[in-house]
Amino acid sequence: MPAAIPLVAVVASGIASAAVGGGIVGALVGAGAALVVTAVGGAIFPTRKPSAPTSPATTGFDASAPGAGRTQSFRQPITEHQIVFGRCKVSGPIVFLHSAPDDQGRADGYFYAVVVLAAHQVRTIGEVWLGDTLATDAKYAGMVRIDRHLGAPDQAANANLVAETGGKWTAAHRGRGRAYIAVRLKLTAEAFPSGPPNIAAIVEGADTILDPRTGATGWSDNPAL
């Protein structure tokens, strides 16, 4: 209905002006001219139809996957803190990357990565996954080293990184209050044909959950708590 109002107004004005100047025939001619002008205007300036809002797709993200959005490691200079409750498979921001010659002298044969799993102390860090495969799989024998840090407020820096990264990771990089894993991979075409994989781990999270039934505070995998 709203689109028809200007058309009626134009037709009416054309009839009125033509009736004054040329009678009924002039009024019909004026009305016809008004219709032509309105049609041309509609073709040049079509009414815009509202479109559904769209959101950009994220490369490599499957919204239908279980736990989508939290099991992928990523590099991002600014990100939110991640809090983990219960037991779940998580990944997180990669805060350190490094490469070095391996024990066979291959340049960049060793790949180092530090992945922060939670922005607080956790109960345990269990199995670590490299892509879709456990790090303990036989094909990774001798290729993988994983150091786990639970995020204690007084934890020390990772000794292996301090010793092997040429001063890039120092004793001051303690990661206090951050649960993380420090991973070293020996990159070979047989073990890692597509390069460094996504890194995730099974984490038993915060032990600060209050059970109002008992008044005790600790770790729990009870979703009601």
Image: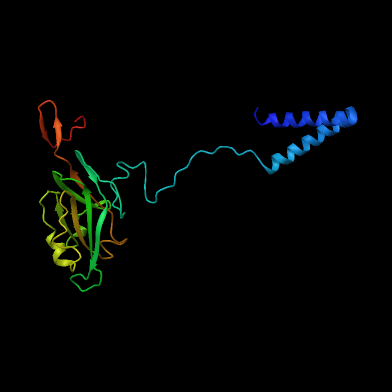
Q: Could you tell me which quadrant the N terminus lies in? A: top right
Residue 199 versus residue 5: which sits nearer the camera? 5
Residue drawn 30% across the image and 61% down it: 195
Residue drawn 20% across the image and 39% down it: 85
User: Height in image: 167 above or below 36?
Assistant: below
User: Height in image: 25 above or below 97?
Assistant: above
Q: Could you tell me which quadrant the C terminus lies in? A: top left
The x, y position of residue 205, in whole percent, is 18, 42
Q: Residue 198 is drawn in which quadrant?
A: bottom left
Residue 211 versus residue 88: which sits nearer the camera? 211
The x, y position of residue 83, in whole percent, is 22, 42
User: Height in image: 144 above or below 57?
Assistant: below
The x, y position of residue 187, in whole percent, is 25, 64
User: Height in image: 186 above or below 210?
Assistant: below
Residue 14 versus residue 20: which sits nearer the camera? 20
Q: Residue lying at the far top in this picture: please name it.
A: 213
